[in-house]
Amino acid sequence: MVTPEQSTIPARQVSALAGSCHPGPLVVVTALTAALAVTAGQEPGRCLLTTGAVLTGQLSIGWCNDAFDARRDLATGRRGKPVADGAIEARQVWTAAWAALALCVPLSFACGWAAGAAHLTAVAAAWAYDLRLKATRWSWAPYAVAFAALPAFVTLGLPGRPWPAWWVLAAGALLGVGAHLGNVLPDIRGDLATGVRGWPQRLGPDRVRLLLPVPLVTASALLALGPAGPPGARQMGALAGAGLIAVAGTVLGRRRERVAFVAAVAVAALDVALLLGGGGLGTGAS
């Protein structure tokens, strides 16, 4: 007979796995890709495949990150992570990561060989970040590659397998670099204490705060000015807003680094709005 206590164990493990997959980035990246697929003109069935591939890829990346960091989190007494809190074992998270990756591969290639290769390049870059590159001066590179590969994954899944416009790829890469800087900024001091010396940690919080707006606003400029024809009032308004928010975040972030991070998120949101509202991804799709 299964006791009430035993019957709750699977539910606890599911909850712990959900907390280990980095649900915030997972939801944002998956939802953004789904929106890009709709904007690019993918058919409903292909949209579901695209979204499923990205969902499983993001699950594998998040679980890989938590499983790999488990020893360091335990050694430093870091709280707020299910493995470090004892809610689940690292080996179980590793199993989930490999299972999600195993699902991601066929789902990606179901969107076409070129599209699948683009998406799996993004996933491989993220795994490389988790396993090695986040503690090196090349920590920015996986973010740049992965964010640029996502719109390519979407457009290469369209009939004719078109590539996105160059300015979409460049803006994606810059958004990735900005996401890396913004994600790391609040945790730089703690990362240094635990031996993580990626590119932002080597720069230090003050330099990162000053650098953070540069890739994001540059991405805004590419997305506003890149499409054919003169930019409209909406594009120019978004570009001006991105610049103002970035400057405000840099100035106010001197006292509170979290303000710089919030400003970066706001600029990134404007960039996403420009990307989704820019009439496709530069392929002629709408």
Image (tube, rainbow, N blue to C red):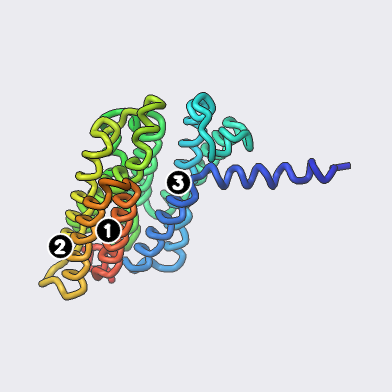
Q: Could you tell me which residue is drawn at 25 percent across and 46 percent down? A: 254
Q: In x, y percent, where is residue 265?
A: 33, 55
Q: Disc 2 or 3, which lies upstream in sequence?
A: 3
Q: Could you tell me which residue is drawn at 41 percent across and 61 percent down? A: 34
| Of the pair 273 and 208, the residue shown nearer to us | 208
Q: Disc 2 or 1, which lies upstream in sequence?
A: 2
As helix, strand or loop, the secondary structure at mark 3 comes to helix
User: What is the three-letter code of the residue carrying label 1?
Assistant: Val
Q: Which residue in the protein does label 1 denote?
A: 267
Query: Where the N terminus falls, by quadrant?
Result: top right
Badge number at residue 233: none
Q: In x, y percent, where is residue 206?
A: 24, 39
Which-is-in-front pick, marks 2 and 1?
1
As helix, strand or loop, the secondary structure at mark 1 comes to helix
As helix, strand or loop, the secondary structure at mark 2 comes to loop
Query: Where the C terminus falls, by quadrant?
Result: bottom left
User: What is the three-letter code of the residue carrying label 2?
Assistant: Gly
Placement of 79 over or under 11, stated as above or below: above
Badge number at residue 57: 3
Q: Residues within 10 Å of mark 1 (few under 14, many from 20)?
A: many
Q: CA distance from mark 2 to mark 3?
A: 29 Å
User: What is the three-letter code of the residue carrying label 3?
Assistant: Gly
Q: Could you tell me which residue is drawn at 47 percent across and 61 percent down? A: 48
| Of the pair 52 and 78, the residue shown nearer to us | 78
Q: Disc 1 or 3, which lies upstream in sequence?
A: 3
Q: CA distance from mark 1 to mark 3?
A: 26 Å
| Of the pair 152 and 236, the residue shown nearer to us | 236
Outermost right residue: 1
Q: Which residue in the protein does label 2 denote?
A: 226
Q: In x, y percent, where is residue 124?
A: 37, 38
| Of the pair 18 and 185, the residue shown nearer to us | 185
